[in-house]
Image: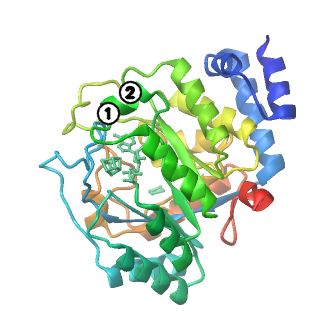
Amino acid sequence: MKVKDILEKACYENILTKDEIKLLLMAEGDDKELLFKTADSVRKEHVGDEVFLRGLIEFSSYCKNDCFYCGLRRSNSQAQRYRMQEDEIVEVAKRAYQMGYRTVVLQSGEDMYYTKDMLCSIIKKIKSSVDVAITLSIGERSYDEYKAFKDAGADRFLMRFETSNEELYKKYHPGMSFEKRIECLKWIKNLGYELGTGFLIGLPGQTIDDLAQDILLVKELDADMIGIGPFIPHPQTPLKDSKEGSVDLTLKSIAILRLLIPDANIPATTALGTLDPLGRQKGLKCGANIVMPNVNDLEYKLKYELYPGKICINEDATKCRGCIESIIVSLGRKVGQGKGQSRHYKRFA
Ligand code: SAM
Ligand code: SF4
Ligand code: FES
């Protein structure tokens, strides 16, 4: 089958076989350009030209897990740890609102210091102070906790499954289980959150076949938001000598997922912008419609080191906001107004 025919099928049926996805992941030259162009027009048709901004608040760099790729892993004794207190988190959320953000993403390592009650209180305080959507990105919790956070006012939840290859999952996530991860994602979806999930590109040992399977799993989980980013080796982790993930494969995965879930929200991730100075622009041109600038103070930004060389690390939140706006405008797009709920979620809610 030719790439042109596969793209036509994807546009009409929103489903592809693993082999068809693999062919798209390997597309080069004119075929690759056609994939990107098609994804860009599907993006325009289904979610428009607006690019929605999410204010990212990384509130704790403590983590009980030991993911092989991540600078926050608990075995990294050199990691700089911090915890923001309740009022401070609420203040930053208010500041984000004043800067124009209508969604805040509360992200952290898996840090059980923040109990169910504490997180519910933070969510309620933010919701009663400013009119924003709240996305949580805090990892695995119990069903009861997810339910309590939803009842307290949380709207969305982001948690990547990282890789659908169970062997690799096991290897890189000691003490964790792929089955449990998927169970959590299903709970989150069933509780009525807008579900965000995705995977890492370029974990050592990952094949094109695995990536195609990752794409199919995002589709199967019926994600409302899709987070895909290249792996970037961190010098204080076991994967320090591994090769970084491919920008090209990341862009192709974004494009393919835009075709398979046309009305999802898809960010052009910070990791993409870190590996390629034009990475976020390229992502926005092949299917992405979201950017997540960090709204924290510099002190915290520097300490939340998942991987080295993160963009915007020395810029204050106001500068990033202005910078990202000019990037969006330079692409002929506009900054989204309002909370930017996933259209996919609306359609099926
Ligand atoms: N702890 C929560 C979790 O794992 O879902 C949320 C925070 S975690 C830092 C957010 C994401 O960072 C992870 O899903 C992972 O894909 C990504 N990440 C961690 N280390 C990375 C690295 N070295 N390169 C690229 N992305 C990385
Ligand atoms: Fe912790 Fe998330 Fe990093 Fe894994 S990816 S070590 S769960 S912060
Ligand atoms: Fe942060 Fe450009 S978006 S400096």
Q: Amino acid at mark 1?
A: Tyr
Q: How far across and how far down the image is residue 128, in percent?
A: 53, 89
Q: Which residue is mark 2?
A: 168
Cβ atoms under marks 2 and 1 closer than 8 Å: yes
Q: Residues within 10 Å of mark 2 (few under 14, many from 20)?
A: some
Assess mark 2: CB under 8 A from ligand 1?
Answer: no
Asked if 308 appears above or below 302 in the picture, the reply is above
Q: Vertical placement of 264 versus 130: above or below?
A: above
- On screen, 250 above or below 271? above
Q: Read off the residue under disc 1.
A: 172
Residue at image position (35%, 79%) is: 118
Q: Residue at x 62, y 58 (%)?
A: 190
Residue 82 occupies quadrant? bottom left
Q: How is the image coloured?
A: rainbow
The residue positioned 47% from the left and 78% from the top of the image is 123
Q: Is residue 330 left or right of residue 277?
A: right
- Circle 2: residue type: Leu
